[in-house]
Image: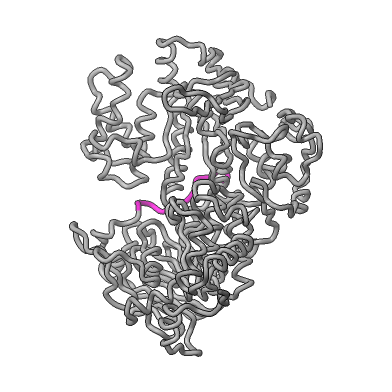
Amino acid sequence: MKRVVTDAGPAARESVEGVDFDPNAPLLEVTDLHVEFRTRAGVVKANDGVSYQLGKGETMAIVGESGSGKTVSAQAVMGIIDTPPGYVTNGSARFRGVDLFQLPESERRGFRGEKMAMIFQDALSALNPVFRVGWQIAEMYRQHRGASKSEARQKSIELLDRVKIPGAKERFDSYPHEFSGGMRQRAMIAMALALDPEVLIADEPTTALDVTVQAQIMKLLADLQAETGMGMILITHDLAVVAEVTDRAAVMYAGRIVEEGTTRQLFKGPLHPYTLGLMNSIATPEQKGTSLIPIPGSPPDLLHLPTGCPFHPRCIYAQAVCAEVRPPLRDLGDHRTSACHFAEEVAEVGR
Amino acid sequence: MAADHVAEPLLKVEGLVKHFPILQGILFKRQVGTIKAVDGVNFELYPRETLGLVGESGCGKSTVAKTILRLEQPTAGAAYFEGRNIFEMDKREMRRLRREIQIIFQDPYSSLNPRMTVADIVAEPWEIHKGEGPKNQQRQRVENLLELVGLNPDHINRFPHQFSGGQRQRIGVARALALNPKVIICDEPVSALDVSVQAQVVNLLEALQDELNLAYVFIAHDLSIVRHISDRVAVMYLGRVVETGTEHDIYDIPTHPYTQALLAAVPVPNPDRAGTKRVILEGDVPSPANPPSGCSFRTRCWKAQDICAQEVPELVDRFDHGHPSACYFADTKVGAVVGASDEAETE
């Protein structure tokens, strides 16, 4: 029996077809996202009012250190937060106008993989060690598209080829442990791209890789994006990667976005002392022989956030007001925002 | 090289080889292969200098560190500390050596015993090396050490879990300093830390070097940090040093294709310069269990010729720069990089 693979299976067709997309809405619009983790030690507000937009073909970075909430914001959008302990308590995530948080789980399933996909830092733990790599990719077609075994196999070999895994046909039957780190990452990318998603969320996709392989993977992602026109969210802590590949960047600290703008704007003149501090702490050739300029202190414990602006204990511009009033994310014109009472002064220094 | 360094090298590694056997079988283990983790490494470390050791994972940089301290037994080669061969030392000499060479590990979470207080951790070297510690004011000395590494001396009775990653790494540094070593081997000391904290630890290491006249072997994969802290750099690939020179030699006029490709792969934190001249090196590092014949980089190299598969190029000065390179076609022109091959990946 022969069936065309693009003919969606019953499950997939129901879930996405019943939804009315707004053609004028942005591809992905996250508004006032609140996510909290209810732990025995207390409630951790991992995301405390996060908002951003992603357009078609755009690459956006979410930058932050460990614990800043950057991964949680993406997991909330994908709907893969473990509940309990994690709960989305407020906000919306609209995919072309449709609020994902309002959909029943059965319909959200149709979005995952089909419309939005995510790749992770550690491909070894993202792939199932007891199944062959090709089989795991082919599963996407079997589950979502109802493809037959041989069609699914054919499709996934094409995909492995597309992510430039040499000898895709032979590699179909390999297990994840037989792949090198870079190849596993490619396999995971293949899986994410299987159903031509419109949004790809890449969570630290190259952090675990060596620098030469890192460059290969970033190039692959950029090429695939140019080919498909998907929107991409790149979650990273590496500012150099941000500078290389993204159009816009949002900087997160302690569960909130503290600054947003185009990547170029951010690097030219940061508007938040935290962003400025991150840029200054990068070792550049010009700084050879001098001391680096680190940010003093360490990232805050989310269970015991400082009062006012959570960055104030580490901030060199902090005034009395910073310990009392938490600065809102202000629009500073030119499509830029900053959550600092003294953003204008920081702009002067940053220049 | 010698012209720059009037002093005798503190540490001199010659032809260091470390092979691990691959064993198979349950009761009667037999060797079915060899992992050539380190396969002939030479370098020198002079007093008060920092030697950066860079390379991708699996190139043997950490094995070099462990073998120098004899945490692993070397297969062949020699390492001289102040003229004495470390690998021929007896137990008593080894003990003395370990006072002179200390190590800081990558992971500040697993390298500190969670059941010991900071006071116990920092003072533990004096337990092992009896008579080396301060006689009476041990506690005072620990407090001084904590202060030296930028920690609050009042926190002396706390446990590791009460500290952040950066602070834990500082505890590791304090412990390494307890016996007044001459050499500290820093094995990826900042890669587990947050970006904003990395710079703090790098600054601390630099300040301590000036204050205490330390020499560092600084092992890292972050090339910009290595550039910042190092006086000289050795680039490793698959168990061998492929190029060595001053920080300027390596970063500004690299001659080995691998060094050139490695540097080109580093993303630049400047959107205006992004993507201008990137060489994408194809493929992965070959397995050290089955390295290619001849030059181990040849399978990924765009300059490779027949000779590269037949003979191992020696690490020798090819330009009279005092800047040895292990490539038959070493070239100072970085522009040579641009013609990288588009050949299919090799495994």
Tell me which secondary structure the magenta stretch mostly adopts: loop
Res A90 → quadrant? bottom left
Q: Position of residue A201 (x, y in %)?
A: 47, 67
Q: Residue at x 75, y 52 (%)?
A: B341
Asked whether residue B253 is in view, the answer is: no
Residue sticking out furthest to the right: B306
Work out whether residue B14 or residue B59 is closer to the camera in this orientation and state it.
B59
Residue A156 magenta-highlighted: no
User: Taking B85 as reference, is B335 left or right?
Assistant: right
User: Taking B101 as reference, is A86 left or right?
Assistant: left
Q: Position of residue A240 (x, y in %)?
A: 55, 58
User: Taking B167 as reference, is B69 left or right?
Assistant: right
Q: Position of residue A253 (x, y in %)?
A: 37, 63
Q: How is the image coloured?
A: one colour
The range drawn in magenta is A287-298
Residue sticking out furthest to the front: A1
Up-down: is A249 above or below B298?
Answer: below
Q: Position of residue B94 (x, y in %)?
A: 43, 15
Q: Residue at x 63, y 60 (%)?
A: A161
Residue A296 magenta-highlighted: yes
Work out whether residue B202 or residue B333 is closer to the camera in this orientation and state it.
B333
User: Taking B142 as reference, is B337 left or right?
Assistant: right
Q: Residue at x 63, y 71 (%)?
A: A226
For the N terminus of chain A, the quadrant is bottom right
Total numbered badges shown on the rendered structure: 0
Up-down: is A127 above or below B99?
Answer: below
Res A31 → quadrant? bottom left
For the C terminus of chain A, the quadrant is bottom right
Work out whether residue B245 or residue B115 is closer to the camera in this orientation and state it.
B115
Asked whether residue B333 is in view, the answer is: yes
